[in-house]
Amino acid sequence: MKCYSALFRGQTLAASLGAVLLLVPVFHRADVEDAEIVPDVVYGHKLGMALTFDAFKPDKGNGAGILVMISGGWISRWYPPEQSLTQFQPFLDRGYTIFAVRHGSSPRFKVPEAVADVRKALHFIRENAEGFGVDPNRLGVYGGSAGGHLSLMLGLDPQNSGDGPDKVAAVVAYFPPVDLRTMVGQSRRFPALDFDAEKAASISPILFVSPDDPPTLLIHGDADRLVPVANSEKLHAALEKQGVPTDLLILKGAGHGFRGAARTQAREALYAWFAKYLTK
């Protein structure tokens, strides 16, 4: 593995509409095994803080990339990227480049701001796709729970804060909440949901289903008490009605978070979905 410490010079926005300054990475190499890690790539700033992702590049890439939403309860935690390598190794073995995307976390930042952050990350990755060795038209996204919600927002509502649409080619969402209009309000457990209720519709994936949405796989346990399986059932029906390629895998007896056989079954379905829609 080659571990790269990357510093991107410049800023991502140019003065003219849609113009983006291509940022050039500066690398410091350390040989470890036969992969590349590009840690802490800065895709934006807010309140003087950097917004970052880690990129994991396979030794032999297939040209496709997958954005992984690092989010639980709309809290995005940082871990040394070397610790995440085991989790992402099956993707690397299949030739995918992985982008582990972090966003501004609650309680300081709320769900609408997390959505805006990951949209910015997608835009940055598309604009710099060549440098990462991926095709900007072959990007997938996945995540679980809050990360599943963010994945759906990138897939179903690709508008990027006035910079024009950014598309992903495939989505996989584990046990995602799909209608935040029913969830907004004060919450000790999920302070990210404490925001103006009038904004909830703008970040509810169920309201953005349209015929041009990317192929979307939903995976949910029927024993999920935190985010009931009805969320995925409702979205799956809406996608089918619009003719969007979609599937719903319901795991019997699985709760919020998959373990054992359920985790294996979910992962195999995820790999097959991305193989079908991201690889040539």
Image (cartoon, rainbow, N blue to C red):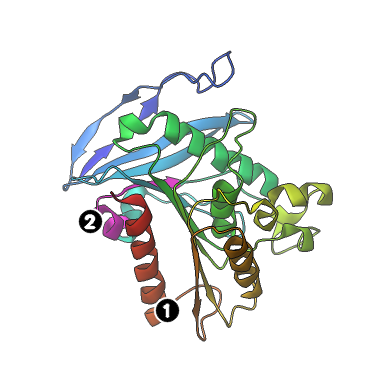
The secondary element bearing badge 1 is classed as helix
Q: Amino acid type of disc 2?
A: Asp
**Occupied quadrant, residue 183:** bottom right
Q: Position of residue 164 (x, y in %)?
A: 58, 30
**Occupied quadrant, residue 182:** bottom right
Q: Which residue is mark 2?
A: 93
**Occupied quadrant, residue 158:** top right
Residue 239 position (above or below residue 263): above
Farthest bottom residue in view = 253
Q: Residue at x 25, y 30 (%)?
A: 28
Q: Residue at x 30, y 56 (%)?
A: 91
Q: Position of residue 240 (x, y in %)?
A: 57, 64
Q: Nearer the viewer, residue 135 or 115?
A: 135
Q: Amino acid type of disc 1?
A: Ala
Whether 91 is among the magenta residues is: yes
User: Viewed as shown, does residue 151 lie left or right of 5?
Assistant: right
Residue 112 position (above or below residue 148): above
Q: Residue at x 56, y 35 (%)?
A: 165
Q: Can residue 109 be seen in the rendering of this structure? A: no
Q: Position of residue 60 (x, y in %)?
A: 18, 45
User: Viewed as shown, does residue 156 lie left or right of 199?
Assistant: left
Q: Earlier in the sequence, mark 1 or mark 2?
A: 2
Q: Which residue is mark 1?
A: 262
Crowd around label 2: few <14 · some 14–19 · many ≥20 (10 Å): some
Crowd around label 1: few <14 · some 14–19 · many ≥20 (10 Å): some
Whether 95 is among the magenta residues is: yes
Q: Position of residue 159 (x, y in %)?
A: 61, 38
Residues shaded magenta: 88-100
